[in-house]
Structure formats: structure tokens, C-alpha cells
Image: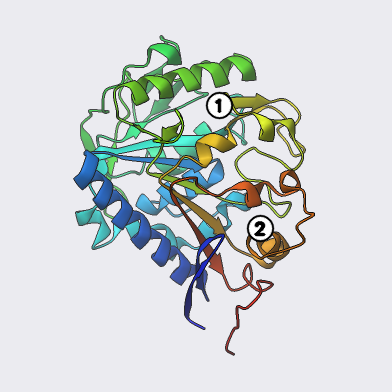
Amino acid sequence: MSFSRVETSRGELRIRESLDDLSTDLVEYISQLSEASVKERGVFTIALSGGSLIGLLGYLCFSFQQSMPFAFELFLRPNSLVKLCETPYIKTIDWTNWYIFWVDERVVAKSHADSNYKLAKDGLLTKVNTSTLHLFQLFAEKQTVLGGSIENSTPLKVLNLVPLQSKIMPSCSFGCLVPVIPSHVHSSNDSVSAEEAASEYEFGIRQLVRTRVISVSDISDCPKFDLILLGMGPDGHVASLFPNHSALDVKDEWVTFITDAPKPPPERITFTMPVINSASTVAMVVTGGTKAEAVHLAIDDVDVGLNPSSLPARMVLPTNGKLVWFLDREAASKLNGVEFSE
């Protein structure tokens, strides 16, 4: 089986034999969504979860060769990481109209190995080939990038919501251009509490909803991102929404915080499930045999007695949008009715 595409009550399944083929399919899908959104609204809003953010955007231009947490596993192979930097994507995607958000963030110092900001700076910010990437950063107080700096002189709640404008630097090893991040990009202070960080981040998103940069769900008042891209843990957790955690019950907030995550670091902020399920499209990217059982439970018709909160991934089902699962053969190996040819 080189490629399988199946429609189910739990979303569309797109299954590929290899990680290379899976990443190509994912990049093509994102490219098409971006083109359609920019044509319709003039912008493309994409929110990615933790390491998945860096992994996906790393397709733009970098070879990431170090050990990474589960959310990165799709993006391990260098030849799959540069696809958005290759023809036709490099010439057809309108990067200047992308708005990028994180679905969740770890509340750690900007220099910490678990910091999503550090991962973005090390693996993405110095290598993306655009000078107008709209980037929301959460936990960097001050960061030097290629001689430029990001100064935290203003809290997130008074974000300067202007596209990044900067000169283009010489090309990187993949032939991509490197931008300098300008000083007017603001982020929240990494010394604030998880609760304060969540509140400020939600405030900033609400400002963009008011100006219609981010669409609004026609069913609820939640933001409607064009694409939310999620990974999934072996326990079925998504973003920083863990099995049987009280954060799964939060309905009235867009962003919540937790201080007791079952995996380190314990303090995190995360989109709530209503926000995830208000997206126009949610893409679940899952690879590897260690996720096969969770994939089966999340997608297949299983015992109706299963408590949804015990498997957050099963709670992901956009109310008025589309759910697409991008799976490799190993992750899909326990799905009912999916047959593999040798």
C-alpha cells in the first residue's frame, strides 16, 4: 500500500508507507489550504502544537538532526524537512500572509531546552525564507538573532500587530533567505506565571479576532483558525491537554494553563478543546507503532463506555470544520478495515 485515503465518521485518513511520502502529502495539503485561505481572506492562520510547530515550519528550511520529543518524530529526516523550500512550494506559497500561532507552550525560561521559543529560534527563526512572517512568541524576554534583537519592552497585551519587516540576509545552505527578526516583535515575559501568560496570550488573540485577522466560528465566539496541526502522544494527549485532566473541561476560555502536566515540564499553557474544535481544519499527524493503539481508540468505533476524557484525541472533532489524520503505516497498523499489501 503506497497510499490510502479513507473517509470515516472520525475524519479523513491519509495513510502513507514512508515518512518521506507522508511529509510530502502533508506539505501539499498545507500548501493548498494556504492558497485557498489567502485567496478568500487575504491571510492564512495556522496554529501548531509545541514541537510540531517547529517541525512543520522547519520544512521551510532546516535540517534538524538532534533527538526530539514525540511531536517532532514526523520531521526527523532531513530530506523531508526542506520540502516547503523546494519547487513548487517555495514559489507558490504566499508566506507574507501567514500568521503563525502555538497551540500550547511550556512555561520555562527562554534558554531552556524545553522552550518552544528556543526551539523556534534555533531551528526556524534564523532559517525561514521570508521577511514578513507573522510570529507570535510567548516566552522570550530578549533574544539576539543574527545581530538583531527581540526586546521585551511591552507586554503581549499591547502587541504591535504589524507584519515583520526586515532586510533579507544571505542565503542559507539550502538556498533559502534568512530574515532578521525586528525589535518590534513582542513577547510575554518568561518570568510571569502560567496563569498570567495564558491570560495575555488569549488577550492578544482576541485583538486579532476583533480585527478579523482570525476568523470567528459561526457557532461559537471562538477563533476559527484556518489550520490547527496537532501531534498525539501514546496516551492520546493532544496539545497540553492530557487524559482525565480538568483542563479538558474548560469551556469559557480560549487559552488555559496547567501546573501539573504528567510529563515535564509541569507548567504549560494550551488552547482549550472548544478552540481546537472551532478550527476550519484540524490535521492530526501521528507516526510510529507506539501510537497505534491510541490511533485505534481515537478513530475506530470502540466500546461506547469509553470515557472521552481518557483519550483527548478522540475529543478532537471540529464542529463545523474538517478533521484529517496523516498517518504512517505503523501508526495505522491497528485500525479496523485498513489492509496493507506486502
Image point 44% across, 46% down: which residue? Answer: 320
Secondary structure beneath label 1: strand
In space, the residues marked 2 and 1 are separated at their CA atoms by 24 Å
Residue 36 bears which disc, if any? Answer: none
Viewer-nearest residue: 310 or 291: 310
Q: Position of residue 26 (x, y in %)?
A: 42, 61
Q: Position of residue 24 (x, y in %)?
A: 40, 66
Q: Position of residue 163 (x, y in %)?
A: 26, 28
Residue 255 bears which disc, if any? Answer: 1
Q: Is residue 180 above or below residue 243?
A: above
Q: Is residue 311 above or below residue 269?
A: below
Q: Nearer the viewer, mark 2 or mark 1?
A: 2
State the residue position of label 2: 298
Instruction: Kindly tell me whether residue 141 is visible in this rendering.
Output: no
Q: Residues within 10 Å of mark 1 (few under 14, many from 20)?
A: many
Image point 28% across, 45% down: which residue? Answer: 129
Instruction: Kindly tell me whether residue 229 is visible in this rendering.
Output: yes
Q: Amino acid at mark 2?
A: Ala
Outermost bottom residue? 342
